[in-house]
Amino acid sequence: MLIFAVALLLADDAAMDFPEKLPGLTEACLEDAVAAGEVTDTDDSHKYICTGDTAAQLWTFLESADVRPYEQDTPSGRWLSREFPLGGCFKRTRLPDGEQASTGLSCTIWVPRPVPGKP
């Protein structure tokens, strides 16, 4: 019973931290992406991808803040995704052959950039 009470208390703390902790976790993801050279351009944004502990911390935070996930089926397997303003985290749950995945977690931050000719 005590464990249940502590779990509820921790869950309340996580909910109170959302979205206040998101800027710090986003900054850590941006730094990780830059250090790893995982920065590319899309048509209208700069795309930063972080992995490892940085992505795991961001995923755990989104999960504890009850950011609802959704599933995506892709050629590289099935992914569970959680989105937040300017980004999202993606965790592979199944490989293309249907086997359970044990790797595959990344978070992406999209920073808008001006596009010539668009208002």
Image (cartoon, helix red, strand yellow):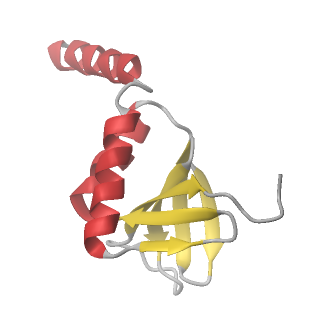
- Res 44 quadrant in image: bottom right
Task: Tell me where residue 107 appears, x and y as whole percent.
Answer: 43, 59
Task: Tell me where residue 60 appears, x and y as whole percent.
Answer: 33, 43
Residue 14 drawn above or below residue 116: above
**Which residue corresponds to the image point at 24% horizontal and 12% vertical from the top-left?**
5
Q: Is residue 55 visible?
A: no
For residue 97, side relative to residue 36 (left or right) = right
Q: Residue furthest front?
A: 116
How many labels sit on residues? 0
**Which residue corresponds to the image point at 54% horizontal and 82% vertical from the top-left?**
76
Residue 15 drawn above or below residue 95: above
Front one among 107 and 109: 109
Q: Residue furthest left?
A: 2
Q: Is residue 106 visible?
A: yes
- Viewport quadrant of the N terminus: top left
**Which residue corresponds to the image point at 38% horizontal and 45% vertical from the top-left?**
26
Residue 88 drawn above or below residue 25: below
**Which residue corresponds to the image point at 45% horizontal and 68% vertical from the top-left?**
92
Task: Tell me where residue 87 appears, x and y as whole percent.
Answer: 53, 51
Task: Tell me where residue 56 appears, x and y as whole percent.
Answer: 29, 53
Residue 75 drawn above or below residue 2: below
Front one among 82 and 41: 41
- Res 81 quadrant in image: bottom right
